[in-house]
Amino acid sequence: MRIVECEVAVIGGGITGAGTLRDCALRGLKAVLIEKNDLASGTTGRNHGLLHSGARYAVQDPESAVECIAENRILKKIAHHCIENTGGLFVTLPDDDPGFHALLLQGCRAAGIECDEISADHARRLEPHLNPDIVAALKVPDGTIDPFRLTSANVLDAVEHGAKVMTHTEVTGLIVDRERIAGFNCLDKRTGEPFELRARVVVNASGVWGQKVCAWAGIDLPMFPSKGSMVIIDYRVNNVVINRCRPPADGDIIVPGDTVSLIGTTSKKIPYDEIEDLVVDDDEIEVLLADGEKLIPNVSRTRVLRAYCGVRPLVAVSGKTFGRDISRGIVLVDHLERDGAEGLVTIAGGKLMTYRLMAEMTADLVCRKLGRKAACSTRSTPLPGSGKKAPLKKTARRFSGIPQSVVGSTHYRHGERAHRFLSRDPKSYGLICECEMVTAGEVTYAVRHLMAKDLIDLRRRTRLGMGPCQGELCAYRAAGLFTELGPAKGDEATRMLIDFLEERFKGLKPVLWGDALRELEFTYWIYQGLFGLTELDRPSESDEAD
Amino acid sequence: MKYDCIIIGGGLAGLTCGLKCLDDGLSCAIISAGMSALHFSSGSIDLLGYDPPGQVVPAPFETLSRFIEARPGHPYAKCGPETIEASLDFFRRELLAEGLEICSNGRDNHFHVTALGTLRPTYLSQASVFNERIREAFFRQPRIAVLTVKGFRDFHPGLAAANLRRNALFKDCEIVTGQIELPWFEQTPQNPHEFRSIDLGRMFDSGRGLGLVAARVKEAARGAVFVGLPAVIGFEDYNRVMKRLMDLTELIIYEVPTLPPSILGLRMDNALKSRFAARGGVFIAGDRVIGGEITGGRLDHVHTRNYGDSRLRAGHFVLAGGSFFSGGLVSEFDRMSEPVFGLEMDYQPGRGNWYSPAFLDRRGHPFLEYGVKTDQALRPLDRHGRPVENLLCVGAVLAGYNPVKEGSGGGTAIATGFQAALRVAAD
């Protein structure tokens, strides 16, 4: 059996794993990451993409608030191509307890978060679609962050610094060598090839799935999954993050992102065995739309694009087991100290905002365990894409001749790395996904350099199929490109196409009314009526031929 | 303005109904809100492709009587096999008058090849998709070529060929793929990698460089005598272009429907509209009927967005507004409705019942079967549950059939459109 050896093996390709891999690679450690699915395919890719200022935590969790604002400032420097510096508002509605406004202001000041009291009129000038009845507003440095691009950029940088990444690869067993955990047996799900991943330290960065990784090692680390659901609406109805100024509750935020806006979030405790089959419930949709409408009345007249949910990876540290009460703080466990198991470290809890800090803490511990002295450099080293400030104007001039919309979208998504694949070759800038302006060149780059192994991965790298039509035409076109570029033969690409359509359908089911139903009917006519996709699994009928 | 018959909706059902009305000497207007489902159809007419367990139906007219007996609520049951067959004959004659030849495999179904290389049973196809030569070629040729036009995003031979190879029908065939570069490729202001089927179809219409195209097709076919191309071989002048291309290449060329817009469907749409105009019908395009007045069990008049307060009157009205995507039916968070008259609908309450768990579920999706409830004469019930005497419903707005799962969409549109016209004429 093939053996992959390294100093540190990271299990989990979410943002925590990706950040840890990068931190280790930048410190010169030989690092390998495995992920059972795709990068950012778990909790990382299933949140509202908020670049927290920390204000949301300022009243109840001052420690998190301080962490958030510190990381907020760092990320704006090192990951600016994944971020929109939109600013955020906390608005008080007539029904809300007016006292919370003052508490929040006080909390922010204590945590060092810039927080300005502005008039309701001023707030409405900043965000014209805002509910005209708001009574008070606070302005905070919230923003938006794209978790897919952030994860991908971390992995790309790690790989460029010598790390190895294997996606669609799962753990199948534990390797113990002289009483220490020496690695895991793995299986490449795409090729079916089993291999041994041996490392001096294994980092369990699998979020809520970390309980399962620990279980392989006979360690009990209970997680309390809390489901959070969100609704995406098909227009960017706001340009500033809108928070409801009240203690955290369902439906208290609307975050703009790319071409859409998101209404978040619910919180429901779920049994651990349900984490693989999450469904958005109807009552969640009703609550999100009703509360979203209170912030921005337009929401009720806007098409709902899809709904999705993620599981918060909460680790019980205080004995409390309800969603919002369990600490969202960072939990770093050396299992040698906790369980007498040498060679395994778990990093859990935390949030997207603090991934870099979590990675730094983890890599520090790994270095201590390996006896290596190497300092963390991720506070100031920009991620690929944020390397240089490449102003859009300059980029647009450089690529004159290519439609501005294409240059703009590509630059928005890939920062200065856009220069690596934007080209005046018309084939390269030919659009594959017209909703999100994804070109054949961008698809090629994602397949060759960003580990997009199938169409669903490709969506996470490029936004292909994430727009209003949800992959109606681009899914087929991209499947065709996969065959042209070589990573998939025709029948594999067809399978990818089916998987992609089914994955899109999952997020459409909870919101299948109105325009979403119309669009789905059209997609169904194309892929079943026109293309006969289910015929592929039909048993041979040669005897019935005419 | 007063007509014998006003038809709301200018898709396959509405146009067939209109043509039959004119054929029977009635005055007729069609009010059409926009593009119809023909724009993304295969351009073939499915009559009954699959039986209830999902097996391919080889000879639809042999099963139709039994099928109808078991489903008294099905639109086909409201037409009957004789009318269905008569409607299809009528439809073919009308299109042939416009130069669009429609072929059938006798009274049996035939297969048409899709862009993904699957085979779909269908009943009527354009001559470039099915005819006797193509039928013979399928079974004689050891080598088939599937080609595309260089840069065309909406048809990929690699996908079609891979899935054809998996099909037992083609086990003795060698299937080759390739692409041809069009001679006018680099000379357009548009990015040639963003051409749609219509752009290519129009270029073929021009006839420019067809000799060079033919030479390239022949070369790319690598000895195959039977060649599949994306359905872009002429948008308006398709008969002449196709004939010239076949003459020049001495190959049998077969068209495969592409991603929308589907030229095969558009040709049919154009031919039907042109025929409707030629027969003296009034086609009001880009307007939408937004309401009407029902008094004493009769629809007196309708009004439209563009005509404002003007009332459009007719002895009979036909509702052919299509399904959800056409706007003929509307769904909301927890209910469905017919938006123009508020007609009674047949549907399952509870949004969770509207769809199947998987997108490509073999059972299809229940929402496709929802629609306006009608009596055996295709008459609906108004919002108070009372029948409307002079309003008939046809095509995808109807409840009681699943066009995709049964492979019955085109047939139902034509048969019910035809049947409604017969009833209007008889009144």
Image (cartoon, rainbow, N blue to C red):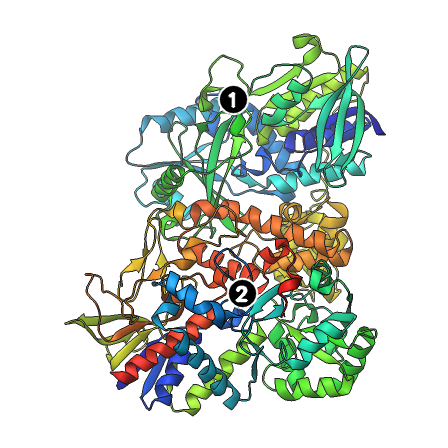
Task: Judge whether A214 appears above or below B361 on screen.
Answer: above
Counting from the top left corner in percent of width and height, residue A494 is at 67, 54
Query: Label 2 is found on which chain of the structure?
Result: B
SS type, badge 2: loop
Instruction: Say which residue appears at 55% left-offset and 48% top-offset.
Output: A504
Dot 1 amino acid type: Phe
Instruction: Say which residue appears at 51% left-offset and 19% top-offset.
Output: A327
Counting from the top left corner in percent of width and height, residue A119 is at 36, 39
Query: Label 1 is found on which chain of the structure?
Result: A
Occupied quadrant, residue B239: bottom right
In this figure, which residue is indicated by the disc labeled 2? B57
Can the viewer see residue A411 in this picture?
no
Which quadrant is home to the C terminus of chain A?
bottom right
In this figure, which residue is indicated by the disc labeled 1? A224
Q: Relative to residue A122, is residue A360 drawn left or right?
A: right
Q: Nearer the viewer, residue A82 or B319?
A: B319
